[in-house]
Image (cartoon, rainbow, N blue to C red):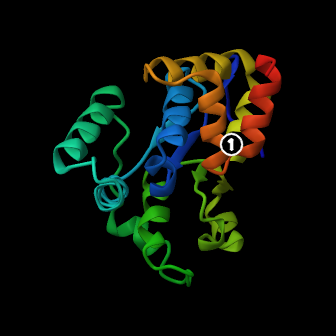
């Protein structure tokens, strides 16, 4: 893919799908990369609602209060991350059929944000001809993180360290193991090599 160059650091607008923000380690890695100015991360309220609803459904300890706390924390840290698609954004998708109609809102949000990348683990839900027509690059979190590590290793090491320090019980080893479990094995292997594990 072609990165958009800004100064010494490639900056792209990345629309994070719900399945990326749902995973704590993927969310932390992506947001910490954004804090290192490696990417700009955006999402819609619909995507965030999908994240919190599934967390409430699947994690007994995650309550409505937890959902509010997560949303507030994201809003404080990334106050400009929320984008809302307009009817005009949806209109650009009218002629396309999608495997999952729920993802129409995700692509519309990417259009609204003028995103460069849609980051998702549901690659099959986003047909390549549609994405290419709209000028959107489709990447899994694993693919995105590997590209970021190769582009700016030092900042991604800093993002890795930040992801660890945000949770007292996390270590290099546990975070790398979590990346593997979350479907980012190439990122885990590359970071483990860089850190000497």
Q: Position of residue 107 (x, y in %)?
A: 50, 64
Residue 91 seen from this side: yes
Give the left or right position of residue 167, taking residue 38 as reference: left
Q: Position of residue 136 (x, y in %)?
A: 63, 57
Splitting the image into 4 quarters, where does residue 175 fall? top right
Splitting the image into 4 quarters, where does residue 73 fall? top left
Vertical placement of 110 versus 82: above or below? below
Give the left or right position of residue 70, taking residue 90 as reference: left
Give the left or right position of residue 115, taking residue 130 as reference: left
Vertical placement of 4 versus 125: above or below? above
Vertical placement of 65 versus 133: above or below? above
Q: Secondary structure at mark 1?
A: helix
Residue depicted at x 60% and y 30%: 174
Mark 1 residue crowding within 10 angstroms, few (<14) / some (14–19) / many (20+): some
Splitting the image into 4 quarters, where does residue 76 fall? top left
Vertical placement of 156 versus 145: above or below? above
Residue depicted at x 68% and y 46%: 184
Q: Position of residue 130 (x, y in %)?
A: 64, 72
Q: Quadrant of the C terminus?
A: top right
Residue depicted at x 18% and y 50%: 64
Q: Which residue is mark 1?
A: 144
Residue depicted at x 44% and y 43%: 42
Residue 146 seen from this side: no
Give the left or right position of residue 171, taking residue 61 as reference: right
Nearest to the observer: residue 133 or residue 29:
29
Instruction: Give the total of numbered labels.
Output: 1
């Amino acid at each position: 893919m072609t990165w958009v160059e800004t100064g010494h650091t490639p900056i792209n607008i990345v629309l994070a799908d719900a399945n990326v923000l749902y995973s704590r380690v993927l969310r932390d890695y992506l947001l910490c990369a954004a804090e290192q100015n490696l990417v700009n991360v955006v999402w819609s309220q619909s995507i965030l609602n999908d994240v919190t609803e599934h967390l409430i459904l699947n994690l007994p300890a995650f309550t409505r209060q937890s959902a509010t706390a997560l949303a507030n924390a994201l809003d404080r840290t990334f106050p400009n991350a929320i984008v809302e698609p307009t009817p005009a954004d949806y209109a650009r998708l009218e002629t396309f059929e999608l495997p999952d109609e729920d993802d129409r809102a995700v692509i519309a949000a990417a259009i609204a944000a003028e995103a460069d990348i849609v980051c998702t683990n549901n690659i099959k839900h986003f047909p390549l001809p549609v994405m290419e027509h709209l000028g959107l690059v489709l990447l899994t979190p694993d693919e995105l993180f590997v590209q970021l590590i190769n582009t700016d290793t030092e900042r991604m090491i800093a993002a890795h360290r930040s992801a660890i320090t945000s949770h007292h019980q996390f270590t290099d080893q546990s975070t790398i193991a979590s990346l593997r479990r979350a479907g980012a094995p190439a990122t885990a292997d590359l970071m483990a090599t860089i850190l000497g594990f």
